Structures are given as structure tokens and as C-alpha cells.
Image (spheres, helix red, strand yellow):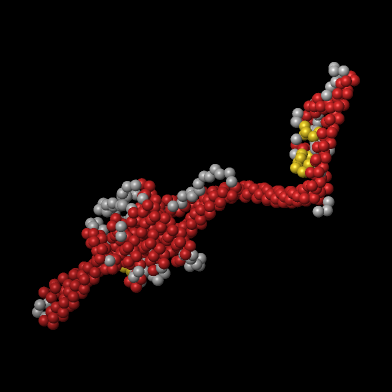
Amino acid sequence: MTYLLSLKCLTETVSSLSFLCFLPDPKDPIAIERLNLMNMAKLSIKGLIESALNLGRTLDSDYAPLQQFFVVMEHCLKHGLKTKKTFLGQNKSFWGPLELVEKLNPEAGEIAASVKDLPGLKTPLGRGRAWLRLALMQKKLSDYMKTIINRKDLLSEFYEPNALMMEEEGAVIAGLLVGLNVIDANLCMKGEDLDSQVGVIDFSMYLKDGGHSSKTTEGYVIFFLYNGQITAILDQKNYVEELNRHLSASVNNLQAKVDALEKSNTKLTEELAVANNRIITLQEEMERVKEEHSYHLESAHKDNADGQVLGDTWKQLKEETQLRLDVEKELELQIGMKQEMELAMKMLEKDICEKQDALMELRRHLDDLRTLNHQLSVKTQTSDATLKQKSEVISRLEEKANQMAATIKQLEHRSRQAEKERDLADEANRFFKQEFGDKIESLQLEVEQLTKKKACLEQELKKERQRKSGPNDAVPMEDQSVTEDNQPSVCNMCEEEESLIRPKKLCNNCREVFCESCLANELPLPSSISPVQVCNQCHSKLLHQYSSSPS
């Protein structure tokens, strides 16, 4: 299976490279014909390989892609053939070049002998078709084609200098034929009429819709998929138009040949009528000579006595006899010419019937191609409208992408500013610790001593109040402060209603109550070395104060 896939990839690669390498001159119709034939050979070989691999069995003579492949190969071998003049007109046959393979490659001798032994093959065209089928079954078609293409000195006897077999396109087709070695074919040619088959290419087999559905929502993917579909449709449309033009030219040429044959038929009919009149005239003269001869014989018997008259009569009899022989020879010649002209007329009528059948077949294909051309035009218009819609979607997506890029740039700028502010705060904190670290420790010790003194004084004051007012009226101050702190209140900074249910804390600098979101910053204070929680407003003031103080 890997071998089959590799051959298939090789065929596709060779065909794509051949399309890129052969760009014909638009003013050279022969080069355009060569390129068209090469592309048709590429399509037929590729389609035959794919269909045979999908079919998975031995191919027979009724397989349509195989029949079309032989028709395309026949057109390729006929391109640029030199014409040979015969009694019935000009004749082109590719059997002559194929006979060279037997001389150049001994393995082809078996095929040539088999072709000559086949019954029912009366024309060189039929023998050439049988040779192609036997070479395909032998899996040597590519090798044989390469053998004769490499000997262009021998091919020049049969082909024109600008023929396909004499140019690089012939070598490309021979390389493409390597892929057919994976196909198994069993073709029976005994009951098949290879002499009178009409080789017409069915282009509808290769004009397939190359589009495939895609349900992705990304704008760029949709654009490239539809772009590929439109390119394939436009290529098919251009190819159909080119084929339409060639078929129209072929129809005109065949019509001209039919007109010429009709004129020749009329001329031969007139000549036949003249010959018939001449035969009738000669027959009348022969009867008159016979009558004169009999009359002279009677006169000779009557005048037997006169020797001189008898001698003249005998001399005249010899002349009349010689004249009669000449007339009979001319009559036989005219009869032979009449028979030949009748035979030629029958063959011309048969040829005209075959040409008319081929002309009708070509006209039918031309109508099919026109219908396909119309369908492709409708598809092209629909694809243009779809492409316009997708282009609008892409433009909107690009605008959104530009907006997102601008937003990202703004966020990056803000992030850099925040980093700079954080670095400044860290630097100020470091300077503050270096400058006021010792003072803060001493102040903390003093604050602790004062706190202890304050606690002692408060205890003495409580005892004094209890002693004066009695045990029932005394309420501790700490309990009152806890009651006030536990009561629900609004944050003094954000003043939001949701702050009623949030827990509150005191700012260690201004000693006011704030919610946790407004008390999220920490800074060291003169009263403490380690960082403590401060509100946002005190945080900004302290940062400004620390940054403005001398280091």
C-alpha cells in the first residue's frame, strides 16, 4: 500500500512540476495544443489510478476511465503526424512509430507478433490501438514510450518537428505513465472492433466540482478555502472555453471536408455520366462497323471476278477489323474505369457517413460543454458574491485585531508605569529604613514605656472610679470601644453600601476606620520598623514624604 501511495504522490508531483515548467507562447497554437494534450493525459492518468485503487479489482475493456485513457493516448500519438497521400486521400496512422519499438527493444517483439496474429484487424489504426492495450497489460507502456522518445532521429520520419512526441511534453507523458504499473488489466480484443471506433474525448469525466464544505468560523480559513474553490472553477471555465474553441474549429474543418467530398462526388458523377455516353457512342460505332463489314463481304462475293476490287475490299476489311479491336479495347477500358469509379463512390459515401456520425457526436459534446460552461458561470457568480461577504467579515476581524493590539499596547504601558512606581516605593522604603531605623527602635521603646505607664494610670483611675461610684455603675472603657467598633458602619474612604457588611480595621497612621479593600497597603511608620497597614490616602502621602526627604 505504501508503494501505491508513493507512486500516486510521484504522479501528482510530476504533473504539478510539468504544469509549472511548460508555459506556452499564447501566439503559438501548436504549443497550446501540446500543453492541452499533456494536461488531458495528466488528468486521465491521475483519474485512472485513483479510480482503479478505489475499485480494487482487475480492469476490463468496459471500464470507462480506461477507455478514455486510450483515446487520450491516441490523440497524443497522432499529434504532428506527417500525412501520407493515398488513392482515397490523406492518411495519418501512429502504427509506424510503434513498429520502431520492436527494433529498439527486443521485449516488444512479442507484442508486435500478437498484434499481427489478431484476427479482424485490417487497418494500421486498429493495430496501433491493440498495441497500446497489450503494452498496458504487460506493464511496459512507460518503458516503450521512453525508448521511442529518446530516438528523435527515427521519429522525425513520422512526426513534424513541433509534434508532441518530438518536444519535452512527450517525455513528461512518458514519465507519468510509470504510475500505471500498479494497475492490473485484463483486456479481451477478439470481439472488439478496433478499426472503426471513433476516438472522442469525454471531457465531462474531468470537469468535476473541486469544492469541499467547511464549517469553520475563522475568517481567514474560510477566505483561503473559497479562494481555492474559485481558482479551480475559473481554471475549469477557461479550459472549457479553450476546448469549445478547438471543437468549433474541428467542426468547421469537418464541414469543409464534407463539402469538398460532396463536390468531388458531384464531379465523379458527371464524369461517370460522360463515360456512359462515350460507351454508348462506341457501341453504336461498333454496330455500324459490323454492318459495313457485312456489306463489304457481300460486295466481295459478287465481284469475285474483279481481283483489284477484291484486294481493296480485303484491305478495307483488315482496317475495319483493326478498328473494331481498338473500339473493343477502349470499351473494356471504359467499363473498368466505370467499375473503379463506382467502387470509389461507395467508399466515399461510407466515409461521408462516418464523418457525419463523428460530426454529430462532436456537436453533442459541444452542447454538453456549453451546458457545463453555463453552470460554471453561475457557480462563478455565486462564488464572487460569497467572496465579497467573506472579505467584509475579514475586514471587520482585522479592525478588531487592530483595536485589541492598541489595547494591549496601552496595558503594557500602564504595566511599565506600575513597575516604575513599585520600584520607586521599594527604593523609598529602603532609604527610610536606612535613615530612620535607629530612631524608630528608640521611639518604639519609649512608646512601650509610655503604654505601660498609661496602663498603670488607667488601672489606678478605674480603681478610684469604682471606689467613688460603686460596683454597679462601673463599665470598662475597653468594652465600650469594642461595642463601638463592632457596630456596622460605612467605610470613610469608599463610602459604598457594600462596606457595611465588610470587616473594618483601623489605619495605624490616621487611626480611622476603613474596610479591607481601602486598607490593603503596608508601610513602615516612625513608630514601628516593620511595615504596618495604612489606608490608601496615608500610603500616598507617606510615599510622597519619603521620596521628597533627603537621603
Q: Position of residue 64 (x, y in %)?
A: 36, 50
- Quadrant hosting residue 154: bottom left
- Of all residues, the one furthest to the left in this rendering is 305
Identified at 83% across, 53% down, the residue is 550
- Quadrant hosting residue 39: bottom left
User: Where 217 falls versus 479 (above or below)?
Assistant: below
**Viewer-proximal residue among 503 and 138:** 503
Q: Is residue 505 visible?
A: yes
- Of all residues, the one furthest to the right in this rendering is 468
Q: Position of residue 233 (x, y in %)?
A: 52, 52
Residue 168 shown left or right of residue 491 in the figure:
left
Residue 516 shown left or right of residue 200 in the figure:
right
Tally the marks: 0
Q: Is residue 347 visible?
A: no
Identified at 77% across, 50% down, the residue is 434
Identified at 39% across, 52% down, the residue is 5
**Viewer-proximal residue among 536 and 156:** 536
**Viewer-proximal residue among 417 and 327:** 417
User: Where 71 falls versus 146 (above or below)?
Assistant: above
Q: Position of residue 85 (x, y in %)?
A: 33, 69
Identified at 32% across, 47% down, the residue is 57
User: Where 16 falls versus 84 (above or below)?
Assistant: above
